Image: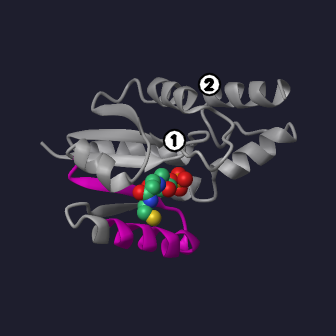
Amino acid sequence: MKRAIYPGSFDPVTLGHIDIIKRAAAIFDEVVVSVLCNHGKSPLFSVEERVNILKEVTKDITNVTIDSFDGLLVDHALERNADAVIRGLRAVTDFEYELQLAQTNRKLCDRVDTIFLTTGLDYAYISSSIVKEVASFGGDISKFVPPYVAQLVYAKYQNQ
Ligand code: PNS
């Protein structure tokens, strides 16, 4: 049984992330989508909220589970007995950082390999930051996130 971990901030999860999750779930027996508890950033959604949102948007994909982690990704990957880490590549601009991350992780633990999936062309321009910026000005984010997520994002900005 092959298990992959797909780590990220997912603040919020976008259609691009969901595309990667579905495609990883078609390759691996199990995909664990894991939310980083990033203390440094001030996220729009708490870790618990992001975990619940991810559970809702992946509820129909039977081999996907949702988790969260603190600390090093390699430690989490080992704890979860993962065979690979999945990361999405949207454009060349992502590559430098992702390569650095993958190589650092392999130096930290050579059992943890990273597999890159290229984001679907329809979603390549989407980022969680852009979604938040558009929503903060009341713009239409319906092409970037599922309706359920859009509703929650708008609610956050209405309450600020
Ligand atoms: O969605 P993101 O913010 O691009 O995801 C980044 C993530 C979570 C993959 C990365 O920041 C991470 O793995 N953080 C945990 C700390 C760690 O292990 N860093 C790698 C060594 S630099």
Give, as a single range, the part of the protein colored magenta.
82-105
Front position among marks 1 and 2: 1
Relative image position of residue 71 (x, y in whole percent): 42, 49
Looking at the rendered structure, the kind of residue marked 2 is Tyr
Residue 132 x/y as whole percent: 74, 43
Whether residue 9 sits left or right of residue 144 in the image: it is left
63 within the magenta span: no
At mark 1, the secondary structure is loop
Q: Nearer the viewer, residue 75 or 22?
A: 75
For residue 152, which quarter of the picture?
top right
Residue occupying image coordinates x 62% and y 24%: 148
Q: Image point 62% across, 50% down: which residue? A: 40
Q: Which residue is mark 2?
A: 148
The circle on residue 37 is: 1
Mark 2 burial class by Cα count in 10 Å: few <14, some 14-19, many 20+: few
Q: Amino acid at mark 1?
A: Cys
Comes first in the chain, label 1 or label 2: 1
Q: Residue furthest left?
A: 1
Residue 68 in view of the camera: yes
127, above or below 100, in the image: above
